[in-house]
């Protein structure tokens, strides 16, 4: 049975309803975990590690990798719950989210140098 929950960020619900199978269920990103405590200011060494890892395959110049507002988590990160963040984030390891990742208000990039695992990844834009 299709169960739609009221989510303020789903502006295109009729389009999604047309493409979802009957058994599908929309999931809301609720009870979001504050991930700020897991991150600290990115150092020049952190940014250099990112540049070496991506080996110029991704152009981060428009996102200002040299800017001071990047946040970094060194090592693997496991989050127990949903995350939604509009910060410029770097994870120097794997990111495991035991919940949903939402990119709804995401206008800044996340750079994950390991694997990303999540219960659901909800991609959308405002």
Image (tube, grey):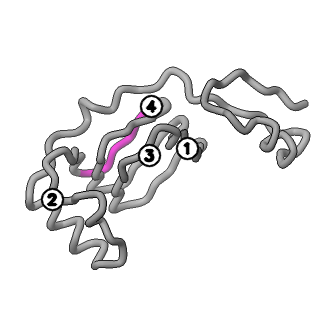
Picture residue at 28% right of the left edge, 78% below the top: 55
The 10 Å Cα crowd at callout 4, few under 14, some 14 to 19, many 20 or more, is: few
Coordinates of residue 61 in the picture (x, y in percent) = 26, 66
Q: Which residue is mark 3?
A: 96
Sequence-first disc among 3 and 1: 3
Q: Residues within 10 Å of mark 2 (few under 14, many from 20)?
A: some
Q: Nearer the viewer, residue 32 or 64?
A: 64
Figure quadrant of residue 71: top left
Q: Name the residue carrying label 4.
A: 80
Point 45% across, 34% down: residue = 83
Mark 1 and mark 2 in contact (Cβ < 8 Å)? no
Mark nearest the camera among 1 and 4 is: 1
Q: Residue at x 87, y 45 (%)?
A: 18
**Which secondary structure type mostly characterizes the magenta part of the structure?**
strand
Dot 1, crowdedness within 10 Å: few (<14), some or many (≥20)?
A: few
Split into 4 quadrants, where in the image is the C terminus? Answer: top right
**Real-space CA distance between mark 4 and mark 3, rounded to the nearest whole angstrom:** 9 Å
Earlier residue among tags 4 and 2: 2
- Cβ–Cβ under 8 Å for marks 3 and 1: no
Element marked by disc 2:
loop
Mark 3 to mark 1 CA distance (whole Å): 22 Å
**Which mark identifies residue 125?**
1
The magenta-colored residue range is: 75-79
Is residue 99 left or right of 38 when viewed as pictured? Answer: right
Label 3 packing within 10 angstroms: few (<14), some (14-19), many (20+)? some
Q: Which mark, by number, is residue 66?
A: 2
């Amino acid at each position: 049975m299709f169960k739609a929950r009221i989510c303020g960020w789903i502006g295109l619900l009729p389009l999604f309803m047309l493409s979802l199978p009957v058994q599908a269920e929309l999931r809301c990103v609720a009870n979001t975990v504050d991930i700020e405590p897991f991150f600290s200011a990115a150092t020049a060494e952190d940014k250099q590690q990112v540049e070496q890892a991506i080996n110029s395959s991704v152009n981060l110049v428009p996102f200002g990798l040299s800017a001071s507002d990047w946040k970094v988590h060194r090592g693997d990160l496991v989050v127990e719950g949903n995350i939604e963040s509009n910060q410029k984030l770097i994870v120097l390891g794997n990111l495991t989210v035991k919940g949903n990742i939402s990119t709804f208000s995401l206008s800044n990039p996340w750079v994950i140098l390991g694997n990303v695992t999540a219960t659901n990844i909800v991609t959308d834009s405002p």
